[in-house]
Image (cartoon, grey):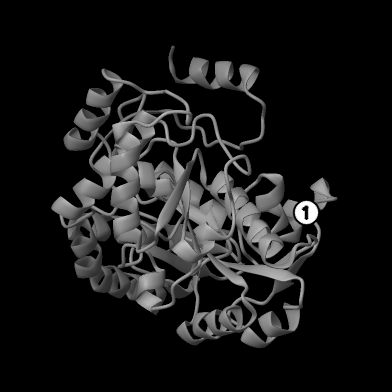
Amino acid sequence: MNKQEIIDVTEENCFHVYNRFDVVFEKGEGVTLYDTDGKEYLDFASGIGVMALGYNNKEFNDAIKAQVDKLYHTSNLYYHPSLANASKALCKVSGMDKAFFTNSGAEAVEGAIKTAKKYAYNKSGHNGYGIVAMESSFHGRTVGALSVTGTESYRNPFYPLMDKVTFAKFNDYASVEAAVDDDTCAIIIEPVQGEGGVTPAKKEFLEDVRKICDSKDILLIFDEIQCGMCRTGNVYAYMGYDVKPDILLTAKALGGGLPIGAFLVTDKVAKSSLTPGDHGTTYGGNPLCCAAVEASIDIMNKNNVLENVNELTPYLESKLDDIVATCDKAMSHRGKGFMQGVVLDESIKAGDVVKECLSRGLVVLSAGGNVLRLLPPLVISKADIDKAIDTIIDVLS
């Protein structure tokens, strides 16, 4: 099929819930995507933070191919080597104690919510506990995840959602303190809000939230689905704040492009929450996706991916300074590591900038609050940064 035929067949047969760009990507190599016309695109979106290792990484591909020839499903009624290896590797790099593998980030959020509710139930013997979430947050599209997502326009068509969710202001501890009551079982926070506008948490904010959780035996959930896996200059962003959660959510880059997520808990939570029969999944933790987790973590370690992020972040931020200094439409920039946002003037829409960049061979994203969002693969070079920034300046000018 040619490009238009692919688009037409997709539109005819797929439920129209995505407004896709008029591009058909066919293959990728390194940090470059190629469409069906052979045009090259520098990828500074990485599949919304998924393709941390870039495309067609031979070592990753070989690991997946080897597992396909062995086994790719058994169900969670049985053990398999990939689950043992992936769980050990993930617990080690995350600093957490126990892992539950899911198929997606949204499912990890759902599992975290159930874990927190069961923890509170075991503690008191009654249910009806609520959660404090943040305004401008994004945690997913399923009912539970949507219930704690802090954008009213996302939630409004789907009420009634999960009850007893209270929204506090991000980076405003007083509003969190006011939202907490005797029936609060958890507080859920993105250390760096992604969809909400690429806004990092303040260290003192997370420290204060940790203190109130400790004093009231409330579980602190960090959603690192987008900001985890080395993206912000630490393996997980919480490590840069020195504030450890009780439950950690991860997905996106975790599987190197394969669909897998996880929620991880401390031993304290594991011993006092979910038990057999409380939670489960058919595909979560399957041998193929677990092999992807093991390969992703191994390659990141061996190829000094985290070191590349930390080495090039100052350079990337200096180039973002150039955008703000050069372009009247760019008001400021913010972010951590390779998760950055350029705040645009209200006279121009981030979506229009994304579209124009795409036409010039640069893939970028938008985020809430009229922000141009950059989530490049973690293996980019200075030359890639130069090319991307030059294109953005050209578009904004």
Q: How many marks?
A: 1
Is residue 358 visible in the rendered image? The answer is yes
Quarter-wise, where is residue 378 in the image? bottom left
- The residue positioned farthest toward the right in the image shown: 160
Quarter-wise, where is residue 320 in the image? bottom left
Q: Is residue 13 left or right of residue 59?
A: right
Task: Please determine whether, in this image, residue 354 is positioned above or below residue 236.
Answer: above
In this orientation, which residue lies closer to the viewer: 171 or 274? Answer: 274
Task: Please determine whether, in this image, residue 244 is positioned above or below residue 362.
Answer: below
- Residue 100 in percent (x, y) is at 47, 46
Q: Is residue 329 left or right of residue 25?
A: right
Tell me which residue sits at (28%, 50%) in the image.
89
| Residue to which mark 1 is pinned | 162
In this orientation, which residue lies closer to the viewer: 294 or 336? Answer: 294
Q: Is residue 293 left or right of residue 266?
A: left
Task: Please determine whether, in this image, residue 233 is positioned above or below residue 171.
Answer: above
Tell me which residue sits at (23%, 61%) in the image.
306
In this orientation, which residue lies closer to the viewer: 229 or 360? Answer: 229
Is residue 362 visible in the rendered image? The answer is no
Q: Residue type at mark 1?
A: Met
- Residue 188 in percent (x, y) is at 60, 66
Secondary element at tag 1: loop
- Residue 352 in percent (x, y) is at 55, 52
- Residue 261 in percent (x, y) is at 46, 45
Tell me which residue sits at (80%, 51%) in the image.
161
